[in-house]
Amino acid sequence: MEHYNMNLTLKVWKQKNRNEKGRFETYQVKNISSEMSFLEMFDVLNEQLIAEGKEPIAFDHDCREGICGMCSMYINGRAHGPWHHTTTCQLHMREYKDGDTIVVEPWRANAFPVIKDLVVDREAFDRIIQAGGYVSVNTGNAVDANAIPIEKHEADESFASAACIGCGACVAACPNASAMLFVSAKVSHLAMLPQGDPERKTRVTNMIQQMDKEGFGSCTNIGACEAECPKGISLENIARLNREYIGSMTAGGSQNSI
Amino acid sequence: MPLNSKIPAGELAEKWEKYKSTCKLVNPANKRQLEVIVIGTGLAGASAAASLGELGYKVKTFCFQDSPRRAHSIAAQGGINAAKNYQNDGDSTYRLFYDTVKGGDYRAREANVYRLASVSANIIDQCVAQGVPFAREYGGLLSNRSFGGTQVQRTFYAAGQTGQQLLIGAYQALERQVALGNVKQYSRHEMLDIVMVEGKARGVIVRNLVTGELERHFGHAVLLCSGGYGNVFYLSTNAMGSNVTAAWKAHKKGAFFGNPCFTQIHPTCIPVSGDHQSKLTLMSESLRNDGRIWVPKKQGDTRKANEIPEEERDYYLERRYPAFGNLVPRDVASRAAKERCDAGYGVGASKQAVYLDYASAIERYGKIEANKQGLANADKATIIALGKDVVKEKYGNLFEMYEKITGENPYEVPMRIYPAVHYTMGGIWVDYELQTTVPGLYALGEANFSDHGANRLGASALMQGLADGYFVIPYTLGNNLADDIRTKAIPTDHPAFVAAENEVRERINRLMSIKGTESVESFHKRLGKIMWDKCGMARNAQGLKEAIEEIKALRKEFWSNVRIPGEINEHNPELDKANRVADFLELGELMCIDALNRNESCGGHFREEYQTEDGEALRQDEGYMYVAAWEYKGESQYELHKEDLIYDVVHPTQRSYK
């Protein structure tokens, strides 16, 4: 693969804290290598700002290998940028060419208030899990791991839902700022396993209730969440969530349909 | 002070059972009065906090990330070991214990390792009960794969995201306890000091990373579950925020640091591509199950990998270690890669890389799949296509990640890999109960030194983190807190809290008032280079002595010329980083001192002066069969304490994987 260098214009959201109004600032970066990751390009920019005696841009990031879910930039109108199934930290600069302008914003949703610049508060997701996103099993209570065989297809499906990294891209991408994909992934992960079955009804009810309480919007089946999800969490999870939810409201309802 | 490892008497296999049956207990009413602080929410921290919350203790957790679910355990890829013997291939608790002690090059404590092996099976049971979706076979039972340094298949996995799934399991158990009110969780908080009252750890000073405010929290006990310190090398597979700060503060308050020089260099990482590099990405060891590692037989060969014919390739691991082949332990595989590259056989633009090739695995799997599907005379293209599908199912996410980073398709061309810093076997010294030399202060998971000796086997870190948190600390903490039931919560206006907070505040003020010209990042990079060059994969006395002086000088420069923008009382990631790098600048020196003291090669610690004729690590059991536990005595002053390692069951030999 040919490597090249580029000069770019960046328009980045700056906001001092949750209470003050934000604005876009324009920056120039030079000699960015096509081999850099998007966040390494931000490292270069921040080093440049520090050298100039200016304040660097605050952004969330940690593992830089696409799994912790901490990074969260909205790049040219897309959560985690243009690459399919990719977090911002895995987006690489060979996507861009010399002279490009890139606009970078934080996740925008009422339930994710801005802490500073591109950093937002996603604790609402923790509270949704606290409402029921678990199996109630204390340490030491477990039977032998092979005591309950699980059909491979079911286990694989459950794993596909459990692959959610809780980054919030689904919320950021949704015009309604709905958290349905996140909630449905957790509900599906556990509903598809025998271990999650006993708490199925209460789990889905309580998690949805908490989701509404946090101020996330409603789902209107647009599908932007699925399109932007870095882990390929499918819209089918939302359909499953709806079935689970309706099932939870009817005595002996459709609990067996997955 | 003599080190007391508190290993219970009796036969190796019975020690832990006996301990559990005879340790002191705390009744439920008293547990509700006892407060426990947990620093870090990775596998060790989350599992400990959840289990202690279930027992009824009042727990507080702290993590610097925005949610406990983001702790770096999440990035572990390949799997978790357990002596289940589901494959009927001869595995047992003893064999897992033996492999771990041998893999660690006989520098781990027998009793701890045996306990680890014996609770390993319970971990898998617990995780499955929580809904961790491990990989399964068509019959619905759990699937296993092989990892380095073993000849059985005992590794449980969830594609290449095992750490993520295990951490989400522990995180969910933790959130359940938060909902029940047993645990209070503090995210975006970083521990900056331990508070000592009458010789015991009784609390912490933490900084709220959103507001910059300092907070005081009391605990009858403090658990450090803050991970390893691989980021001292700047470039490593650790997350950007992974740091030594909590452990280092504990060290300065009296906790001895065990074997700081024992670091693991992982053989299969994506090579450095340039100066801009901010971190290195691991390609799971599980890839060595099926991938074959090679370099050209000709030095400086500039042909593309696919143009080099089979007979001109050197599968050097298979050549040197026929018994284990590509599945030798990490330290051995890393050194072998370095040896080939240093000798001029490296590949890629930098020549600091070797190939990890999937072509033959794709063909092998393709043939099996064609047979399964009854395709008697499948052509090569069909076989390759079928084989790619199988490889995709097993390793798809890793292959995708490789392609995103390098822009090359590993299904078509061999991956380029090179060793990178990955894990630290060294850490805070703990006794059998996981208590440090500071009463009331415990260390769990990668933060402690205990179970992996001089080299950790693959898929054993997840095992150890969860063993410590789910199955060890609930017993050992109770055994000690039983004596503390009369201790009332100490108000945080106690002079010890005030003094500790003032100390932290003064240090932050000092950092912010330097107003120099060089960024924190730049200092970190410079430190990393010294460490990698002189205390990395190979070390020698001369280089280590130089490194110690260079680090001292760099530390001085840091404290007079670092530039930290922004304010104290706001979200300020540069200040957070400065706090961490300042501690790395002290730790790095101790690592070099330890490496210089240990005049032998063992596991990941390779002193060039001590090697066999064919370049293998040469231990010096006569003089160095001990854990080096260092006591902090003031800047650049450390006193060595030795814990002799006594092998009652295993007889240390020269490790051989040939």
Image: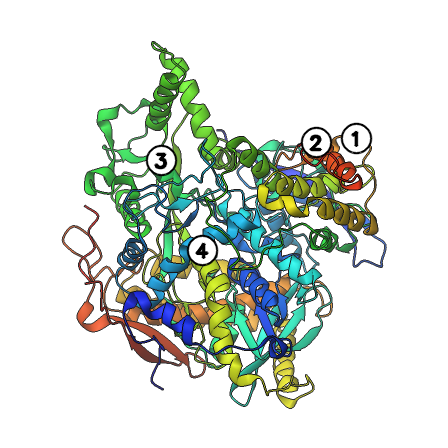
Dot 2: few (<14), some (14–19), or many (≥20) neighbours within 10 Å? many
Subunit under mark 2: A
Per the image, label 2 sits on a secondary structure element best described as: loop
Query: Would residue B658 appear left or right of B644 to someone viewing this image?
Result: left
Asked whether A68 or B488 is in front, the reply is: B488
Disc 4 to disc 1: CB gap under 8 Å: no
Residue identified by numbered label 4: B122
**Residue projecting furthest to the top:** B377
Discs 2, 3: same chain: no
- Drawn side of residue A247 relative to residue B642, left or right: right
Whether residue B353 is situated above or below residue B28 in the rendered picture:
above
Residue carrying label 3: B356
Name the residue beneath numbered marker 1: A221
Question: What SS does tag 1 mark?
Answer: loop
* Distance (Cα) linking label 3 and label 1: 43 Å
Estimate the x, y position of residue A162 in percent, counting from the top left: 60, 42
Report the chain holding disc 4. B
Judge depth for marks 2 and 3 and give the one in front: 2
Distance between mark 2 and mark 3 Cα atoms: 36 Å
Label 1: few (<14), some or many (≥20) within 10 Å? few
